[in-house]
Amino acid sequence: MKRKKWWIVLIALLLVVLLGAGGYHVYRFPDTFRSLSDKSADEKEVGSLVEQMREKEDKKVLVAYFSYSGTTKGVADAISERTGADLFEIKTQKEYSNVYTESNSEIRKNEKPELVDTVENPETYDIVFVGYPKMEYGISLCI
């Protein structure tokens, strides 16, 4: 009888540990259980777009970016410098105290943060680069 109780206790503890690990995984990687469609252009479309860009002499280019640590800002600055693009920093109304946990919370709740400003007349741009940090399988800012 004692052996049976120990097995029950052992199985119960194992279940608690497995459920805890699963719950942590859902918290840490919230996008794992979201189905996001990939609307990326295939190679043929990219090739066509590159040719169109080469044919155009006066391209109006925009680089819009969100940067928490400054890394994405550096890349955005470099692209803007090399292409002569307009630069637009995406800023949230409320600053993040911890971008990882707060943005994860936004992703889980399917919330979008309020932005300070938006790009005026985005349709006037021929090419738009959008840069944002990517944190462990999740987008840090849902725009």
Image: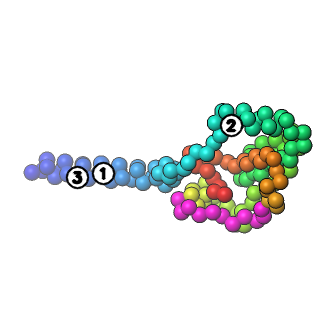
Q: Secondary structure at mark 1?
A: helix
What kind of residue is marked 2? Answer: Glu
Horizontal and vertical percent position of residue 126: 81, 47
Residue hosting label 1: 15
On the picture, is 77 further left or further right than 46?
right
Q: Nearer the viewer, residue 50 or 7?
A: 50
Tally of marks: 3
Residue hosting label 3: 9
Which of the marked residues, 1 or 3, is nearer the chain's N terminus?
3
Gap between marks 1 and 3 measured at Cα: 10 Å
Q: Main secondary structure of the magenta part?
A: loop
The residue at 58%/61% (across/down) is 106
What kind of residue is marked 1? Answer: Leu
The residue at 75%/60% (across/down) is 91
Which of the marked residues, 1 or 2, is nearer the chain's N terminus?
1
**Closer mark to the observer between disc 3 and disc 2:** 2
Give, as a single range, the part of the protein colored magenta: 108-118
Residue hosting label 2: 45
The residue at 64%/36% (across/down) is 42
Q: Quadrant of residue 81?
A: top right
Q: Label 3 neighbourhood size at 10 Å, few (<14), some (14-19), many (20+)?
A: few
Gap between marks 3 and 2 measured at Cα: 59 Å
